[in-house]
Image (cartoon, rainbow, N blue to C red):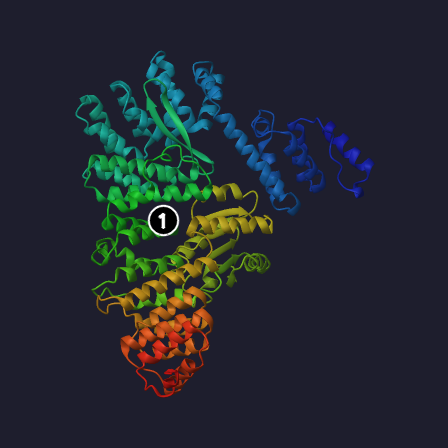
Amino acid sequence: MHPARTRSALLALCLGLMAGWTSPARGQDAATLLEEFVHYTNIARTDLASGYAEQLLNTASATDLALVVDGPEFDRDRLDTALQRASRVDSLEVIAGELTTRIESGRLALARDPQRIQEAVQMMAGTLRQRMIAERRLEAAGEYAVPALLGEIISGKDTALALSCRDLIVKIGRTSVYPLCVAMESLDAATQQTICGMLTEIGYEHAVPALRALAEDTLNTMDVRTAAEMALRSLGANTSVSLSAAWADLSVSHFKGFASLLPYPADAENMIWAYDDFTGLQGTPVATEIYHSIRSMQAAARSVALDPNNDYGVALYAAANLRRENRAETAGVMDPVYGDQDRSPQFYATVFGTGIGQQVLALGLGDNDTALVRDALAALAITTGDMGLFSGEEFGGPLRQALRYPDRRVQIEAAIIVAEAQPRANFGDEPLVMAELSNAIRGYGQPSAVVVAATEEDAQVASAGLVEAGYAVFASATSVDGLAEAMTDASVVDLVVMDVDASQVDPNLRSLRASPRTAASPVLVLATGVDLPAMRAAFPAGGSVMAIDRNASGSGRLAAMNQLMAQASGGMLDETAAMIYAIEATEAVNALAAGTRGEVLDPKEALSTYLDALQSRSGGLRMLIAEGLSTMDSPEAQVALIDAALDASGSEQIELLTYATASVRSFGNQTTSDQVASVLSLVELADDSDLADAAAALHGALDLPGGAVLQFVN
């Protein structure tokens, strides 16, 4: 037995194991503490394993741990076994996850240290052992090693070293493509040819636009252009489209978040590269949440610069810019690339007009990006009138699609835009628009949620947290298929919580996205400590899927839910937001009732909702309802207004009498005999001058005989 282990065990026995764990002596190094954790985990002594692990986490840095684990004397297989076992033990699961995270972050910090990278590059010219060590270090550094490696190639001082550096860049592979493409435009012809060869061997298509630019630039030498053309053929590039279209295609790939284009999904930051003759390749770290959006904007800008008539490129730029702002704000991160633009993202979403706005909306809908969809709708609300309402039909009728999008906010915002435009031509979804407006006026209930869990117990825990957070849980099941029947009556599902084995996350997520009710629903994935890093890498921050530790506290889960809802759809639809929508929908219907553009959208379809709301709503919204009823030619509307006025009191009664009078003036006397008597009684008994005037106006509008009111002539 290891001497330190023997001493620790004897000490524990002397103090009495029944009394609980006593911390190991301070001053033990990281290697010893980690060995103890591995040993006691593997023999199922969780109390001792936990104690050593806690001291290790409290005393050793991430780089300390990485140096130990990757050292020549350490048995990494035993550590992996111990971590896997610990992840299945309740008392060790969180600790195992934290150890795994610390070790990986330490490895990254060491691998990417500029001084260590430069030392490793110089070691490439050393002995065989030095070269082997250097290659391991530089491969681990990935794209962070490319500037130093490329610097040796450019300098050309040591031909053998330059060749070794070239081969190592190829070995690094995918993550070296962007720094190579950025540098290639500014380098000499010989180095450009070398890079073309490297990109050919690496074999990733996101090099195509840069290679096309090199091949089509007549200022380049024929050797360079030929090398670029050979690389393009090797990559199977489609050279039948314009270079502008090629850049737009790359922009789309980033907009869709293709995994192959994100160098390090699990990292908090990724690099945006630039090159100048003085400093060479320089990387600007940007938050991973906005990396794809920045890249998409850059590629779209190149596309539009080559072809100002490329409307799709303009739409991509505007859409990526809106998404970039959304995700930066939600994550609380700064953007060092586009953060100081002179114009806001909303400027780009509106300035190019309705056609571009419709394309931006189509991009958001196609990607199930609720936050972007809502931004696009907000822009269209500013720019769109009747004539441009459905100008995007060639893109799949995005505004009509938005009416069916599985998010309450999107549905009502789209309906309000259509109603406010007061279309003069039928478009096929008139009943849907009026139904959404009515839903908003009527008011929404609790936000809805469903749970997919491996066991009934897990489902109960997740459901309890949702109920406490204010959600109505429709159902829980062990698979998405099991939820189908429960979701039949739901138009949308506001949130999905998934607590299943890691191997079942992707199949269940695909099933969720295939359902019209959950195609865009935010999904909160609960993962174990060991699985959490992989889950977070699979679902980068800022999207509609978020992975958190399943052992998170109730407050931790609630915070995650709120963050996910905020970044995916703008937050939970609370009472305040619902009231704002109700007011906006009522104003839209009232404008329709007062409008003169025909009967494409019939405000009377909301009559029954208005009649109910006149009784159930209060305050300013109730007065808006009354205003709308006063413009509808319906006996029911007029009768309801007079009844409400007769039952009210104070200033509200006076205002309701005014709206009742307006109805009578517009559509004539449609009252009942009982109401006539009540109005006359009110005229006679009113003890307030303003109330008497309002009652008299209604009495006069009804054109009733003077009768009893003659008593006031004296």
Taking the view exactly as shown, the residue that stands out farthest to the front is 714
Relative to residue 73, is residue 625 depicted above or below? Answer: below
Image coords of residue 105 (percent x, y): 53, 32
Is residue 525 visible to us here?
A: no
Image coords of residue 78 (percent x, y): 61, 35
Image point (53%, 33%), residue name: 104
Q: Quadrant of the N terminus?
A: top right
Q: Nearer the viewer, residue 507 or 363?
A: 363
Image point (39%, 70%), residue name: 655
Image coords of residue 600 (percent x, y): 24, 68
Is residue 649 visible to us here?
A: yes
Image point (29%, 39%), residue name: 250
Among the 4 quarters of the image, the one containing residue 518: bottom left
Q: Amino acid at mark 1?
A: Leu
Image point (42%, 64%), residue name: 620
**Does 302 sit left or right of 166 as displayed?**
left
Q: Nearer the viewer, residue 237 or 57?
A: 57
**Does 272 sit left or right of 65 as displayed?**
left
Among the 4 quarters of the image, the one containing residue 493: bottom left
Q: Quadrant of the C terminus?
A: bottom left
SS type, badge 1: helix
Relative to residue 38, is residue 190 depicted above or below? Answer: above
Q: Which residue is mark 1?
A: 372
Q: Nearer the viewer, residue 20 or 161?
A: 20
Image coords of residue 32 (percent x, y): 67, 28
Q: Nearer the viewer, residue 543 or 357?
A: 357
Among the 4 quarters of the image, the one containing residue 603: bottom left
Q: Residues within 10 Å of mark 1 (few under 14, many from 20)?
A: many
Taking the view exactly as shown, the residue that stands out farthest to the left is 218
**Does 383 sit left or right of 413 as displayed?**
left
**Number of labelled discs?**
1
Taking the view exactly as shown, the residue that stands out farthest to the top is 157
